[in-house]
Image: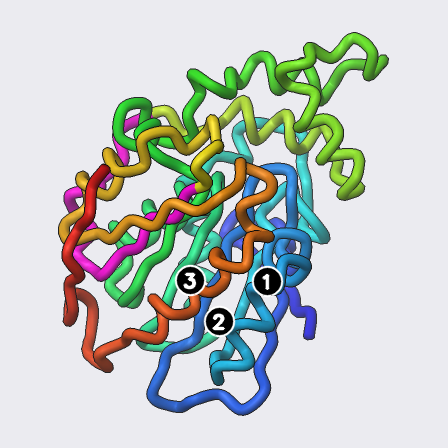
Amino acid sequence: MTHELRTHDGLTLRYHSWSREPVAALPPVVLLHGFAAHARLNWEGPGVVEALVSRGREVYALDARGHGGSDGPHDPARYGEALMARDVRGLIDRIGADRVHLAGYSMGAVVALLTAAGDSRVSRLVVGGIGAGAVEVGGLDTRAMPPELVSAALTADDPADVPESARGFRVLAEASGADRFALAAQIRAVHRGALPLERISVPTLVLAGEDDPLAVRPGVLAGAIAGAELAVLPGDHLTVVREPGFAGALTAFLARDSGGGAGAETAKGTGA
């Protein structure tokens, strides 16, 4: 089903829900997509939603502001992962659950980290598509994805003028029917400060593709979160989510819920 959520600053966001026969003992799962994608593209298409609902999970996925069916203003002041984390807290309020499992990919992973650091209702966390940059830069690895270059690629009148290194974002935006100028506003507002990783105490899994230039040295991130686990899978930034092991690792990790509150279980880190 598709629903609408009104934000604190007056935007209307779209979110989706799926369930079959939910297991009452397990909390809902909230999924946060990556930059230039949307909920269905990032999670339903690759089979992650089906993998979760087939195991009795109730699933929610938000189209971030500027993405999918959500409102997309062109002002960078209306964007940034901190604002998106506030939107996620609003979605959790709407769901009405006292505990949720949270999974984010790429931009959504940064949003998930910020949410988990400040909301005790998150009791288990999966972050994918990010690595050392989350620790060393403070969010998406802007060393590999310079915001100014991506913004120029998204707003260029002629796709032939787009630098090859940023062309993938233009292609993805056009393929998904995204508002390129809304995406450009978000990339200009990308999170650049230190992430409060020391405040995350819930069981966490870091998932990364072995050939993902935006998730290099993911063990650095796993090592910065108390007790985090690490899984490195075949694929790059765009293909790893379709690797069968991705959905398998995510769903298996989220199934290992102890039934307690935040921080009830901590897994051993594997750093690499």
- Residue 155, percent from left and from top: 74, 19
Dots 2 and 3: beta carbons under 8 Å? no
Distance between mark 2 and mark 3 Cα atoms: 24 Å
Identified by mark 2, the residue type is Arg
- Please state, as top left, top right, bottom left or bottom right, where the N terminus lies in the image: bottom right
Residue topped by disc 3: 250
Q: Position of residue 37 (x, y in %)?
A: 64, 44
Report the residue marked by disc 1: 5
Q: Residue type at mark 3? A: Leu
Query: Residue placed at 27% from the left, 76% from the top?
Result: 257
Q: Quadrant of residue 263?
A: bottom left
Residue 94 numbered mark, or none? 2
Above or below for 182 versus 266: above
Which residue is drawn at the image coordinates 34% and 50% (left, top)? Answer: 231
190 left or right, relative to 219? right
Q: Which residues are magenta?
A: 193-208
